[in-house]
Image (cartoon, rainbow, N blue to C red):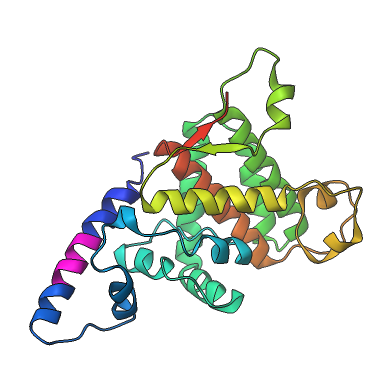
Amino acid sequence: MKPMNVEQRIDEFMQELCQRAQEAIDRGETTNFNTDEFIAKHGNKKLSDIKAEPIDKWTEYGWVPILPSFQGDDFLRTLIPPDSSEEADRIMMGKLNKQEIATLFKELQGYAHNYNHNETTLSEAIEAFQSNLFSGCALLLFASIDSCILTAQPLPSKGRRDLAERAVKIKLEDIDSYRLSCANIARNIIMDIFENAHDFDPTYDKKLNRNFLSHGMNKYIPTHKDCLKLFVLLYSIYVLIDTNVFKWKK
């Protein structure tokens, strides 16, 4: 599978967008959409200089803003933080129609095959999702995310057990690109949903947590949207590994 060169696509789009916007401004014209807002803040900057303002918001709402069909305009929208979980859902769910979900599944299966990961677990997660078995789907996706992270790391001298203890301790290099924002969001979401259950503290009843679900202690029932978030999270991890953004602690 050909890697998704997110940085190149964004940089090319931003260069063209800012050039055209500046030309329009010079002519006394205005731009449409909320590119106006974006350009007012960032139009004189390179993409690498844009602060990662949306990271906390996207993390809070549980979405990594990246999908197979995303084009320049979609990426631009994600650089402006959503004001609410409803807005974040509208941006992402609005793109996740049947065709996009089918494409997402196909790309995930391609990545799993190319990386020699457990294709059966992923396929069963997809089947569970399609059968509206969302708890089972979430459990299988947690396993797929675990597997993806574990097998992407170099095997230490102590073996896999030491790896499992730091499965989500991702080290990010100083990469100046849109991908860095996505990497931070993905890492933060992983660390949130994989967080220690603190002896099954009841405050976790209102959120998706791998340990609660895996040990049968959950009162929060995973939803259709939760599972889509996990599929997108897994997809983002593959993209970020494939484009060499994630660096793993040794």
The single residue placed furthest to the left in the displayed view is: 27
The residue lying toward the viewer, choosing from 12 and 140, is 12
Judged left or right of residue 87, residue 179 is: left
Q: Position of residue 173 (x, y in %)?
A: 45, 37
From this view, report whether residue 172 is shown above or below residue 17.
above
Q: Residue at x 46, y 43 (%)?
A: 240
Decide: is 181 above or below 81: above
Q: Is any part of residue 9 visible from this angle? A: yes
Residue found at the far top of this picture = 157
Q: Is residue 141 above or below residue 26?
A: above
- Name the spot of residue 187 as percent of width and height, x first: 58, 47
Q: Position of residue 161 (x, y in %)?
A: 74, 23
Q: Quadrant of the N terminus?
A: top left
Front residue of 126 and 149? 149
Judged left or right of residue 145, residue 74 is left
Q: Which residues are magenta?
A: 14-20
Residue 16 magenta: yes
Q: Dividing the picture into quarters, in which one does residue 30 lie? A: bottom left
For residue 18, above or below residue 196: below
Which SS does the magenta portion mostly show? Answer: helix
Give the quadrant of residue 35: bottom left
Q: Quadrant of the C terminus?
A: top right
Q: Along the line of sight, which residue is nearer the eye, 123 or 64?
A: 64
- Magenta stretch contains residue 216: no
Q: Indicate the position of residue 23 as horizontal and vertical percent values.
A: 10, 75
Q: Residue at x 59, y 78 (%)?
A: 86
Q: Is residue 243 left or right of residue 161?
A: left
Residue at (80, 64) in percent of width and height: 221
Q: Is residue 118 visible?
A: no
Identify the residue shown where x is 60% and y is 74%. 85
Q: Nearer the viewer, residue 214 or 29?
A: 29
